[in-house]
């Protein structure tokens, strides 16, 4: 079993497209078994990932990230080759995710986001429930928390700077928000997980 987090995978704009547009992880609450024609290819990817994680050579995280990407592509191709239906989220939901991710610093309300997307809060909540199994506001909270983790782990920004980058006027409020989402303060999170 390979378990990885959205904040690990989504370090660039292209990463989130792989996750949300490749049909494997579009429906947050749906699991499926995908038969692969060449399991050795998958096994080789997994063994290499395991070796990278245990030996931790130079830039091992970049290597693991790339290998997971190749693994996802291989599995998705297997799904298509088996004739399975490729399910993708509605365009509106992807636009919602993209808009939130591109506007963290504005700290927009759900009402403002729905206006920008020429839709309603009700429609966004319906899409979020369908694709994520949660409210649109909770999807936003999850995206903000993931971006905060990414900035804390992969950037040189202080906690205060991360707060401002994510549209929080008060760093103390950001710390409370982050702790509520992750059960750790931003400082403790950085100390525990930073490489």
Image (cartoon, rainbow, N blue to C red):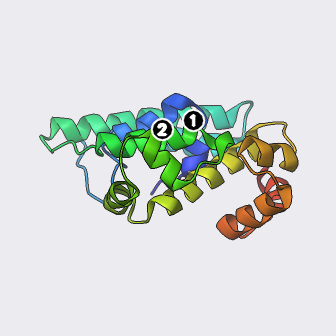
Name the image quarter holding residue 43. top left
Q: Is residue 65 left or right of residue 22?
A: right
Disc 2 and disc 1: Cα gap in Å? 6 Å
Q: Quadrant of the N terminus?
A: bottom left
Q: Quadrant of the C terminus?
A: top right
- In the rendered image, the vertical position of residue 129 relative to residue 103, given as above or below: below
In the image, what residue occupies the spot 34% across and 43% down? 92
Q: Position of residue 61 (x, y in %)?
A: 66, 38
Q: Position of residue 44 (x, y in %)?
A: 44, 38
Front one among 120 and 1: 120
Q: Is residue 165 left or right of residue 75?
A: right
Q: Are marks 2 and 1 in contact (CB under 8 Å)?
A: yes
- In the rendered image, the vertical position of residue 54 relative to residue 76, given as above or below: below
In the image, what residue occupies the spot 80% across and 51% down? 169
Q: Position of residue 46 (x, y in %)?
A: 48, 44
Q: Position of residue 142 (x, y in %)?
A: 56, 57
Q: Which mark is residue 102?
A: 1
Q: Which mark is residue 85?
A: none
Front one among 54 and 6: 6
Q: Is disc 1 placed on a helix, strand or loop?
A: helix
Name the image quarter holding residue 18. top left
Q: Is residue 55 left or right of residue 34?
A: right
Q: Which mark is residue 98?
A: 2
Could you tell me if residue 117 is visible in this image? yes
């Amino acid at each position: 079993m390979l378990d990885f987090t959205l904040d690990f995978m989504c370090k660039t704009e292209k990463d989130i497209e792989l996750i949300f547009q490749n049909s494997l992880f579009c429906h947050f609450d749906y699991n499926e078994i995908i038969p692969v024609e060449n399991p050795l290819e998958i096994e080789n990817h997994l063994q290499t990932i395991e070796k990278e994680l245990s030996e931790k050579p130079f830039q091992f995280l970049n290597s693991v990230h790339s290998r997971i990407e190749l693994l996802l592509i291989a599995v998705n191709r297997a799904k298509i080759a088996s004739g399975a239906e490729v399910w993708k989220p509605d365009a509106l939901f992807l636009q919602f995710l993209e808009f939130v991710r591109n506007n963290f610093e504005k700290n927009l309300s759900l009402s403002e986001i729905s206006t920008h997307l020429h839709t309603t809060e009700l429609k966004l909540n319906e899409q979020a429930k369908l694709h994520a199994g949660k409210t649109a506001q909770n999807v936003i909270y999850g995206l903000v928390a993931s971006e905060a983790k990414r900035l804390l782990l992969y950037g040189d920004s202080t906690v205060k700077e991360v707060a401002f980058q994510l549209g929080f006027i008060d760093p103390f409020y950001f710390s409370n928000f982050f702790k509520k989402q992750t059960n750790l303060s931003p400082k403790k999170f950085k100390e525990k997980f930073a490489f």
